[in-house]
Image: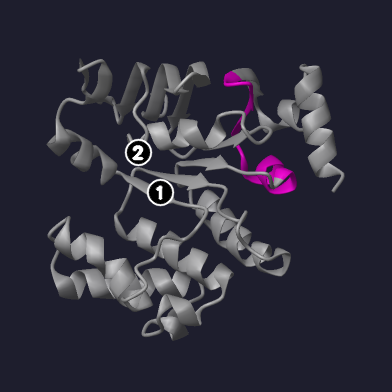
Amino acid sequence: MSSPEIVVAVSNLHKRFGALEVLKGVSLEAHTGEVVSIIGASGSGKSTLLRCIPLLEVPEEGEIRISGEEVALRTRGGRREAADAKQVNRLRSQLGFVFQSFNLWQHMTVLQNVVEVPVHVQRRPRAEAVAEAESLLEKVGLAEKLNAYPSHLSGGQQQRAAIARALAMRPQALLFDEPTSALDPELVGEVLRVMRSLAEEGRTMLIVTHEMAFAAEVSSHAVFLADGRIEEEGPPSQIFRDPQSERCRQFVQRHLDR
């Protein structure tokens, strides 16, 4: 039996903002159907790591592969950049990114937000994209909000719309960057329920989160970042119940006890 395909792989990533080195040689893999949770204190490099995968941030060193294809990077004028913009756009279309702050287009309805990329970027037939968007919005519990504008939705509803928009791209992997951090506490559960159902479907997901109980429940692999390095990684049974690193132990305990 063959092993699952590696959908996302980063190797020896280094990222600096001026004199501040945020990532210090991070390597990580996510296989087909795997849910990888990335945890750690604020400022540990979690979001920067996630943003490097689709090249929203360009690392100074290291390698990024999406479904086995290496992202071409070059150094020009002392700065590292994408060597092939068309390749980056193509590989980005294989990734669904869900941000902290929803990033919905405010002048478009929920349905328009979900069909925009499939129709205008992926060139899929509008009728097909609309039918799929309606199905996805039903999946995330927004069937009755098709024609609503983002400003008329709660934060939890906006984030669920953003998840439907990411799914509409038919991505190889979903990247979640603290998807509940901007939500009022009573709205967190509705977003986590959608994410839990996606994990149960076998979606490949990389999740930066402070929701420790949720991460312990849905993860197949967990990574603890500290000071820009992976201090500990392993199955959730280890990371959340018996971490070997003292810093990881203190972090997990502090968040699970909340």
Residue 109: say if magenta. Answer: no
Q: Residues within 10 Å of mark 2 (few under 14, many from 20)?
A: few
Q: Is residue 49 above or below residue 63?
A: below
- Quadrant assignment, res 37: top right
Q: Is residue 235 left or right of residue 11?
A: right
At x 44% / y 23%, what residue is drawn?
Answer: 18
Q: Secondary structure at mark 1?
A: strand
Can residue 221 be found in the magenta stretch? Answer: yes
Question: What residue is shown at x 40% (from left), y 80% (from top)?
Answer: 149
Query: Where residue 246 sits: x, y (%)?
Result: 81, 19
The quarter of the picture where residue 81 lies is top left
Residue 171, position as x, y percentages in the image? 33, 48
SS at circle 2? loop
**Residue 211 coordinates in the image, percent (x, y):** 69, 47
Residue at image location 65% in from the left, 36% down from the top:
42
Residue 48 in view (yes/no): yes
The label on residue 56 is 2
Query: Looking at the picture, how far across and down is residue 168, in whole percent?
Result: 32, 60
Q: Is residue 253 left or right of residue 106?
A: right
Task: Indicate whether 162 appears above or below 93.
Answer: below
Q: Residue at x 21, y 23 (%)?
A: 72
Sequence order check: which comes first, mark 1 or mark 2?
2
Residue with the mark numbered 1: 97
The answer to whether residue 1 is seen in the rendering is no
| In contact (CB < 8 Å): disc 1 and disc 2 | yes
Please state the extent of the stretch shown in magenta in the rendering: 212-229
Q: How many marks?
A: 2
